[in-house]
Amino acid sequence: MKQSHRILSAVLVASCAAFGAARAQEAPTPKFRNAYYDCRRAAHQQEGMPAGAIVLLGNSITEQGWWEFLLPGLKVVNRGIGGDNTYGMLDRLPEILDFAPRKIFLMAGINDLSTGYPVADVADNIAAMLDLIRERVPACEVYVQSVLTPNDSVLAYEYIKGKRELVRELNAQLRMLCAARGVTYVDVAPLLSDAEGQVRTALTKDGIHLHPAAYRLWVDHLKRNKYLK
């Protein structure tokens, strides 16, 4: 009986080791995929876009903007996906570049910070996006927009709270990255923030997502600085 137990134990150990080795050889679990992301990305792939468009790339803050309404007469394409992070945006960027956009406005990073990715990793991913755009569509004008600081006093999501210093650090890195790459840094955050640097209570519905009035201020800033010409 003891001998059979030893044999069974040896078989189980070998099986577990083989399973572990197989797991180790698999590709890492994606850091951005979920049902909503897959659904929206599939829809974007089916939709396509006109060549030479102005693309707004980002997460839910971008996705919830009515850009076509706010920017009539322009070929504007919304490529925001709720919950997306810089890993997801970097992964789907080649599909956007296939259509040779004229301009890309990028806002990214808060979802990365909220789920624990370091500031340096976020900045590296955005740098990789800038390099890919420069390589694939050299004539495309890129605008990196500052990350908004959530308003902790009214924030509906506990996991996003307490990110003020991380956002400040990320924005500082993005500003330097844009200067080094010759890319326009668009500091949207002060337009929409209170004296403490967080999104104004009157402009947010849950501490992070924006009311229509905020998008109007945002677009007015882009127009005033002639970023949309």
Image (spheres, grey):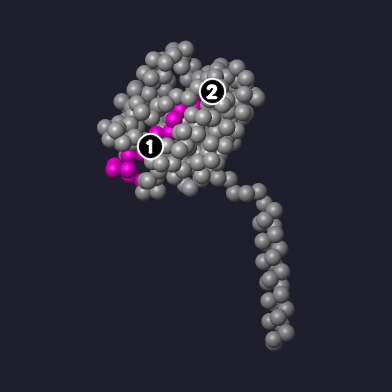
Quadrant housing residue 134 = top right
Q: Position of residue 188 (x, y in %)?
A: 40, 27
Q: What secondary structure is the magenta-colored segment mainly?
A: loop
- Quick check: is 153 in the magenta stretch? yes
Q: For the residue marked with disc 1, what is the amino acid?
A: Thr
Q: Is residue 60 left or right of residue 46?
A: left
Q: Residue at x 38, y 30 (%)?
A: 189
Considering the numbered disc 1 on the image, is that residue within a helix, a strand or a loop? loop
Q: Is residue 42 visible?
A: no
Q: Position of residue 213 (x, y in %)?
A: 31, 25
In space, the residues marked 2 and 1 are separated at their CA atoms by 22 Å
- Answer yes or no: do the residues labelled 2 and 1 have beta carbons within 8 Å? no
Circle 2 packing at 10 Å, graded few (<14), some (14-19), many (20+), is some
Residue denoted by label 1: 149
Q: Nearer the viewer, residue 47 or 191?
A: 191
Q: Which mark is residue 190?
A: none
Q: Residue at x 41, y 19 (%)?
A: 222
Q: Residue at x 68, y 72 (%)?
A: 12
Q: Is residue 1 visible?
A: yes
Q: Is residue 224 left or right of residue 13?
A: left
Q: Position of residue 140 (x, y in %)?
A: 57, 19
Q: For the residue marked with disc 2, what is the amino acid?
A: Val
- Quick check: is 171 in the magenta stretch? no
For the N terminus, the quadrant is bottom right
Q: Residue at x 50, y 31 (%)?
A: 174
Considering the numbered disc 2 on the image, is that residue within a helix, a strand or a loop? loop
Residue denoted by label 2: 183
> Does label 2 or label 1 sit earlier along the sequence?
1
Q: Is residue 11 above or below residue 166?
A: below
Q: Position of residue 223 (x, y in %)?
A: 40, 15
Circle 1 packing at 10 Å, graded few (<14), some (14-19), many (20+), is many
Which region shows up in magenta? 142-157
